[in-house]
Amino acid sequence: MDAVITSLTNDTVKSVRALHAKKEREATGLFLAEGLKFIGEALDLKQTPQMLLVGQDARPHPLLDRARAQTRAAGGRIVTVTHAILEKISRRDNPQTVLGVFRQTYTPLDAIDPAAAPCWIALEQVRDPGNLGTIIRTADAAGCGGVILIDDCVDPFSVEAVRATMGSVFAVTISRASSDEFLAWRARWPGSVIGTRLDATAGYRDGAVIRPALLLMGNEQAGLTDRLAAACDINVKIPMRGRADSLNLAIATGIMAYALTE
């Protein structure tokens, strides 16, 4: 039998809501994904929720039936909750009717196979969860192998970042490393390493690229640091043809990702 929770002060409700906090996500290794589409993406990629929370007003759907069955088969917990609990957990007035609690997955750098994709993306000290989530989604759409987070990047499993991935958080390899670890690993990269800098002289389509390409993108405000820029085979820039002097990080990364996977 599925559990039924109606109290806003229930311990399960508190523990799931606490996953909005980075400290709790790090302590538990879990994260929160909202919506049946997200759950379906996870199931397609053989990732089953540790806990499935279903609103009392959730409409019958074959995907929901599948989610229930696979969660049970994997030993996960299924909980029916009220609309008020969904609002409290999601911190939204119009919450999704199905939420899932999943285990975080990071891939060690040494486990990455560069030849598995034509392009990989590395991000240095990215701060905005919306940017990071959009980049993960774009990496998935462009056919990139994964996203590597260097030094103090925002948490890819924050609720805001996960929402922005639109489910691609389950499809894209995510790694994290210090700059020292990254540079040691980069030394063995078999293809071209391309950085982006406002002070670069080469255009983003200039020069021959040896695949697999490794794309380095910097912080939203400061850009790529000198140390990582120096580790690139070439630094390039995207031309600004209007009055704007720069692009949003996620947009710039998308342009570069598609250029490097054409």
Image (cartoon, rainbow, N blue to C red):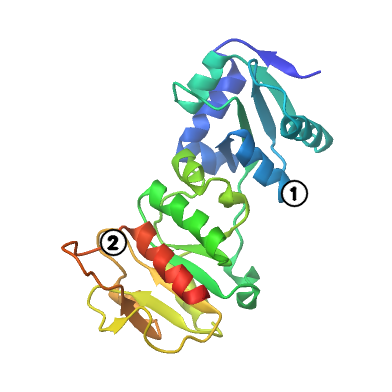
Labelled disc at residue 247: 2
Judge from the rendering whether residue 150 lies leftward or rightward of residue 224; answer left or right: right
Q: Position of residue 96 (x, y in %)?
A: 55, 27
What amino acid does circle 2 point to? Leu
Q: Is residue 78 above or below residue 156?
A: above
> For the point 59% across and 33% down, which residue is it?
35
What amino acid does circle 1 point to? Lys
* Residue 125 visible somewhere in the drawing: no
* Residue 165 visible somewhere in the drawing: yes
Q: Position of residue 10 (x, y in %)?
A: 59, 15
Residue furthest to the bottom: 208
Q: Nearer the viewer, residue 188 or 81?
A: 81
Between disc 1 and disc 2, whose residue precedes? 1
Q: Which mark is in front, 1 or 2?
A: 2
| Alpha-carbon span between mark 1 and mark 2 | 36 Å
Q: Secondary structure at mark 1?
A: loop
> For the point 62% across and 70% down, which residue is it?
112
Task: Provide the residue designation for mark 1.
Answer: 46
Q: Is residue 237 above or below residue 45?
A: below
Assess disc 1: are there few (<14), some (14-19) or many (≥20) residues with their C-alpha within 10 Å of its C-alpha.
few
Q: Nearer the viewer, residue 52 or 19?
A: 52
Judge from the rendering whether residue 9 lies leftward or rightward of residue 42; answer left or right: left
Judge from the rendering whether residue 12 lies leftward or rightward of residue 156; answer left or right: right
Q: Quadrant location of residue 77?
A: top right
